[in-house]
Amino acid sequence: MSWIQGMAQRARELLRPHASELEIDEELRDHFEREVERRIRAGAAPDAARREARLHTGGHQSAKEAVRDGWTGRLLADVLSDVRTAVRGMRREPGFTAAVVLSLGLGIGGTTAIFSVVYGVLLRPLPYPDSDRLHLVEIWWNDFSASLSPADFLALRESGAGVADVGGFTFPDAGFALRGDDGPEVVDGATITAELPRVLQIAPLVGPGLSVATTACEVLISDRLWQRRFGRKPDAVGRSLVIEGEPCAVVGVMPESFDIPGRYGSSIWIGLRPGEPKRRGPFFINTIARLRPSVTPRQAEAALTTRVVAILRDRYGIRNEWRYGLRPEKDVLVGNMRETIWLTFGVVALVLCIAVANVANLLIARGAVRSRELAVRASLGAGRGRLARQLLTDGVVLGVIGGAIGLGIAVATLEVVRANLPALLPRMAEVRFDLPVVAFALALGIAAGLAAGLFPLARLPWAQLGQWVREGGRTSGESVRLGRLRRFLVIAEVALTLAVVCGATLLVKSALRLQAQDPGFAPHGVLSFRVGISETAYTNERAHLFFETLEDRLRALPGVRSVAYALGLPPNMLDVSNNYTLEGETGDSAGHGGVAEWNAVSPGYFATLGIPVLEGRSFSLADTATAPQVALVNQSFVRRHFRGQSAIGKRLKGGDWDPKAPWTTIVGVVTDVPYTGGIWGGNHPTFYEPSAQNRWLRSVLVVVKTAGDPAQLVGPIRRETSALDAGVPLRDVATMTERLDRSASLPRFRGLLFSLLGGLALVLAATGIYGVMAYHVNQRRRETAIRRALGARSAQVVRATLESGMRLAGAGIVIGVLGALVLTRSLSALLYKVDPFDPAVLAGVTALLALVAMLASLVPAMRAARVDPAVILRDE
């Protein structure tokens, strides 16, 4: 029979069982009559021939049963019967059912939630065609890396033919100010080069797109903004939007699928017009390269370095030490969260293993109770396979229900994370519960149910089922048979729990230590916000006058102690770095160079943020554009170049070496504060220039030191800003305390998440120990009664029971310590100034687990002490 005929036969058995019955009757009858005729021809009498044929064929009904047992319909009916039996058993024991499905639901829910993140963030391709060929381009100088400068990007675009197509973008300072009928509104977006949509391979819905050659302001808009502003009319292309005070022509509408990698919900993308740079720096253009199909990343790095460095050396005299590196764009977006996500997935899987062990213990206890029922069914003719299938069906049904509950828990968990911590996890907008995630949850539930069900199935005393019937279920041998397995499961629970709780404690300690770390500035009572003005509407002189006037007006507000503004703020709001050349360090006029964080600040900046000036002076109103150029540096800069000597009076030049450029003199040294990676990222060499000598600033961060609640000044500050320019909104308003808290949100989130997992593991381990000890006490009631009758005191019974529980906990703790050393070592990159093998943490968690084990054993021990020997022995 071919497989097609076999499938057709299975379908007939399932869909038309009555017709299949008639076919069997006819076939068996024909077979019987042929056998009778054969025997009559052999000389047998008709009656004898029928008797012998009936004996030979085994009987009509038994033959039908044998054939029916192989039917698909019969198998399905048996499965449905097993499911109904399992559901009836669950309804009879609601407490047991609730304990099992809740344990599985919590474990499966956590695992599914993390798997959805793993799938959406780490495994799902980026939403661009052939996204594996997209790479971020970085420049490297020794161990320093940065984005590209306009000079680098233009040279890369010129020389990348045959290797890669490149496109660049920069992020706006807290959105763009888009003029509307009711005043300016802040919308999300980016500044992009004309090539970027082509590099990402997403074309406009309408319109030609950005032009490479033009110097006029052009803008692409989203489909949502097209609908909201222009009613989706095609004549929107060619019309203007006033963005940052400058009219920009709409040259295209982008589909919903388009945005900068890692960004979602943007409304506008303005054409980037770098112009012809006069020097190499600064470095701020994020550049994406789409490699040609035949080019590997290593080949592209070598080719681009060779070609571009030669161009930049001819134009700007750069050194040959510069090189280009490529990183897959998906890896860039995930960043250092990859390790955290996989580690969290592993820890959640450990918690799931604890839950499965707990459920297995519950099923073993229930199996011992059901042994009499199984024995009766076996005595009525049920085979081992039939009984085993029923037990496994029980586990699968419990697992499916647990998986459904876990899916609900996972959905709720991710909604909470998405609503409260959207910026912590990259690509969170792409994390959703689609078919692979739902299938994973249900498959995990079935697998967990089967895994838990296999333990009681494997240890069921099949050979002694008949003895259970004869002895009324009082056989004690199965307690010994199953006891070893149950103790093993509890030891495993304790070991896994100790490892998980150790990891959680280390992460909490790390978050607390990070919280207590001195940031180097005084954030309390300081309000901050961003103000941006149009480059076309404001010349350099007018821009500087605007910010100075705004500073004066804000300083005059009641409750304001001091005001300042800067290009960037601590602890993580500075994206500009610059190369520099120190005077005379190598014996010639050029000297030794380096790269440092670069900030431009107004004179009151250090006083407003409480950043101490350790040596020399701060900036003053005398440091104007026509005065000699001056700078302040931080302690890290001094340690890099002037260890053991004063930096005051030393000179340097920003950017690549230019003999005609004036020297900048260092006039002060300030304490270290973090700018790029928050407190966790540490402090880096930083170079400060006065804002009056950097009049190209158009977007600044303003800080206002107040005497009271900073939030009370937001309204007055907004009115003063509008009075200067009604088209300039306040953006990204927050206190410095809030900014500092946000910078540590990821470590706090990790600590909270692992604390919840550790607490769940601790509860599961406690219930596992309690379940084993309660079962142990119940099984030894007769032995306890005899001991009590012979004179044993209650304290002796309690001590014996506690000793049994603590032996289990002790064995689990010893194994768990070894597991904790392995787990905590993998946490090293996630800890801030905390030893992954911290003995205090290990000792504290060990003591906690021992205390939990003792408390979990104490309740059954007290119950054993209250055993009345007369009642127990009379019942026996």
Image (tube, rainbow, N blue to C red):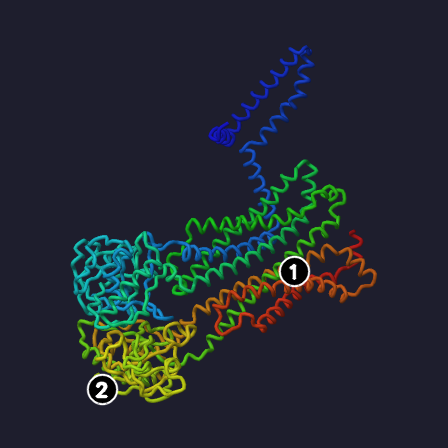
State the residue in front, 715 or 202: 202
State the residue in front, 413 or 70: 70
On residue 627, the disc is 2
Task: Determine whether, in the image, residue 351 is placed left or right of residue 53.
Answer: left
Residue 65 place in picture, x, y as percent: 61, 29
Q: Secondary structure at mark 2?
A: loop
Task: Determine whether, in the image, residue 657 is placed left or right of residue 490.
Answer: left
Residue 792 place in picture, x, y as percent: 80, 63
Residue found farthest to the front: 587
Q: Residue at x 22, y 63 (%)?
A: 271
Circles 1, 2 touching at the beta carbon (< 8 Å): no
Q: How many numbered marks, from 0 up?
A: 2
**How far apart in space, not on screen, are marks 1 and 2 (Cα)?**
79 Å
State the residue in front, 14 or 328: 328
Give the mark toward the camera: 1 or 2. Answer: 2
Task: Determine whether, in the image, residue 47 is placed left or right of residue 438.
Answer: right
Residue 682 in view of the camera: yes
**Residue at the spot of label 1:** 770
Q: Residue at x 18, y 76 (%)?
A: 539
Residue 741 place in picture, x, y as percent: 41, 73
Name the amino acid type tagged 2.
Answer: Ala
Name the amino acid type tagged 1.
Answer: Tyr
**Mark 2 neighbour class, 10 Å CA radius: few under 14, some 14 to 19, many 20 or more:** few
Residue 21 place in picture, x, y as percent: 55, 26
